[in-house]
Amino acid sequence: MRNGTTIIEFILLGFPDIEGLQVPLFIVIFFIYLLTLAGNGLIIAIVWVEPRLHIPMYFFLCNLSFLEIWYTTTVIPKLLETLVAARKAICMPCCLLQAFFLGTAEFFILTAMSFDRYLAICKPLRYPTIMTSSLCLQLALGSWAVGFTIVFCQMLLLVQLPFCGNNVINHFYCDVGPILKAACTDTSILELLGLLATVLVIPGSLLFTVISYIYILSTILQIPSATGRRKTFSTCASHLTVVSLLYGAVLFMYLRPTTHSSFKINKVVSVLNTILTPLLNPFIYTIRNKEVKAALMKAMACPKTPHPQ
């Protein structure tokens, strides 16, 4: 036992080095949050109302957009509060819930999307019989279930720990790692489980995605027409961009050597994952996607008023 005081709340430090910039930063992040909700919500709505988009690729995209709304809503409102509130506290149950809601489902959904692109490009004739509506639903539900079950197992052990250490978290949201530092008992088993989950989820899903794209690129290079190669690659360019952003940021955080300044750098990289990437995803998936742009223009077009006879 470090001391006899039981922790009932945590203090989120956020960004203590931005003294005097809290209000402008609040306005910028709030505006980003609104754009994120609008952009991802618009993708879900467009796919829902446009029958031509009722295909596996856009079904997975809707899941990703909903997940981005979920993640940003879990993180940003509390971040906005810490920017303007004098007291940056978060209750213990709220902190644990925030850590739980930031699951690993995004990695699995992106992996399912890479599998879908692999089948569509490398197995076009068998694609309709393999990637059925039933399989799409199973892959999506499996991604959500596995992603949150991994964190849920950690949470079950975490809620049973006594907390009596330092309750200050040097971050703008609650994560399992910082919470464990406040425990006043041995946490080696939980740390081992967290390391095991990280090793299985991140490199495992990345390996599957890389293998899928090796086959995809190999198939694309065999297309004789340059126009055909470009058109085929454009169907997976957006997904590849999002995968590069996500895994690039995550691998940067986990593969860098730990130094005194690494905590500040990790917070900056976390901003990319939790704030900027969810904002960029709708633009990445629509800016070069003719089908989505056509559906969007169709939805925005004013219906013509019939002329009186």
Image (spheres, rainbow, N blue to C red):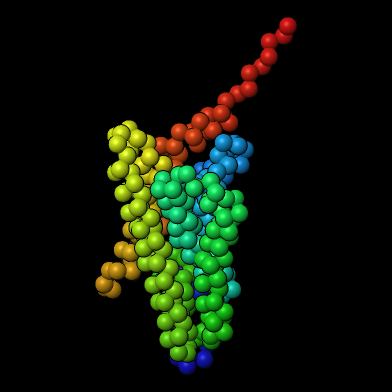
Residue placed furthest toward the front: 125
Looking at the image, which residue is at 47% across and 44% down? 125
Q: Foreground: 87 or 94?
A: 94
Residue drawn at the location 41% of the way across and 45% of the way down = 121
Q: How many marks on residues?
A: 0
Where residue 252 sits in the image (x, y, percent)? 31, 63
Give percent across and percent down for residue 44: 57, 44
Residue farthest right in this picture:
309
* Residue 182 image position (x, y, % from top left): 46, 81
Q: Residue at x 35, y 52 (%)?
A: 215
* Up/down of 267 relative to 34, above or below: below
Q: Is residue 135 left or right of residue 181?
A: right
Locate residue 187, reporting x and y percent: 45, 86
Q: Is residue 82 above or below residue 309?
A: below
**Drawn side of residue 167 relative to residue 264, left or right:** right
Residue extending furthest toward the top: 309
Front-lying residue, 149 or 18: 149
